[in-house]
Amino acid sequence: MSQNKPVVIGVAGGSGSGKTSVTRSICQRFADKTILVIEQDYYYKDQSDLPFEERLHTNYDHPLAFDNDLLVQHVKELLEQKPIKKPVYDYKLHTRSEQAIDVEPKEVIILEGILILEDQRLLDLMDIKVYVDTDADVRIIRRMLRDIKERGRTIDSVIDQYINVVRPMHLQFVEPTKRYADIIIPEGGENLVAIDLMATKIQTILSKKTF
């Protein structure tokens, strides 16, 4: 990797593990212009060619739900210091929005998502791979609170989805990616020691690069 290419960090972990909290905590330790966060959730596949009823059955916890081809392409463009148009996903319509977000490259790129360590092409682009490891009971409680408060879900629907989709997908696809991680952070954003160590490591890498 040449001296002027951005540092790429992958942050993975199960739903409700605290990936976003870890990412936010790392970002707070740097200037706004230093870190760019790319959320894998923005890269769900465009399903505009499918009937709405069919879209309702989308399994968002399966690797095939993501348009990793586009994500890989965008990361490569950012590494070449080129701007991208990050897609936006419309969860009400269950397909990609016509809108897009203009994104400029920065010194550090954090790729965050449940399956960000699942695709070998993405792994090959990463300098640091992180897995946020949080107990299942904590993750389901966090997910339940989020889905009820922010998405208007019922307790029954959240539990049903967790048992029938989220948990089996986690065990089959998410949990196994832990073996690719350089760093495992237990308990997510509450682990300030691990986050401080991450920030120090990033700063060390940045100090050796010339932008």
Image: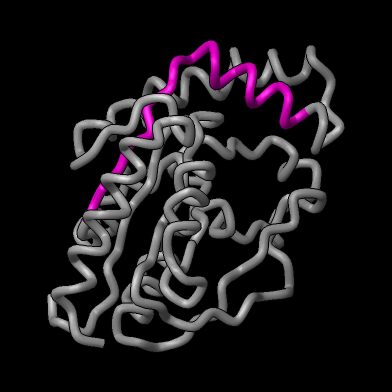
Q: Quadrant of residue 202?
A: bottom left
Check the image and report above or below for 197 versus 163: below
Viewer-proximal residue among 72 and 10 = 10
**Residue 207 location, x and y as percent?**
19, 73
Which of the two residues, 111 or 156, is positioned nearer the viewer here?
A: 111
Quadrant where the image shows the N terminus: bottom left
Q: Quadrant of residue 192?
A: top left
- Relative image position of residue 83 (x, y in whole percent): 47, 86
Q: Is residue 49 visible in this depiction of the protein?
A: no
Q: Residue at x 68, y 59 (%)?
A: 89
Q: Residue at x 47, y 58 (%)?
A: 27
Residue 78 position within the rendered picture, expressed as x and y whole percent measured from the top left: 37, 79
> Chief secondary structure of the magenta span?
helix
Q: Is residue 152 left or right of residue 7?
A: right
67 part of magenta stretch: no
Query: Which region shows up in magenta?
Result: 128-147
- Relative vertical location of residue 117 with respect to residue 149 in this rendering, above or below: below
Task: Please give left or right for residue 34 compared with residue 97 in the image.
Answer: left
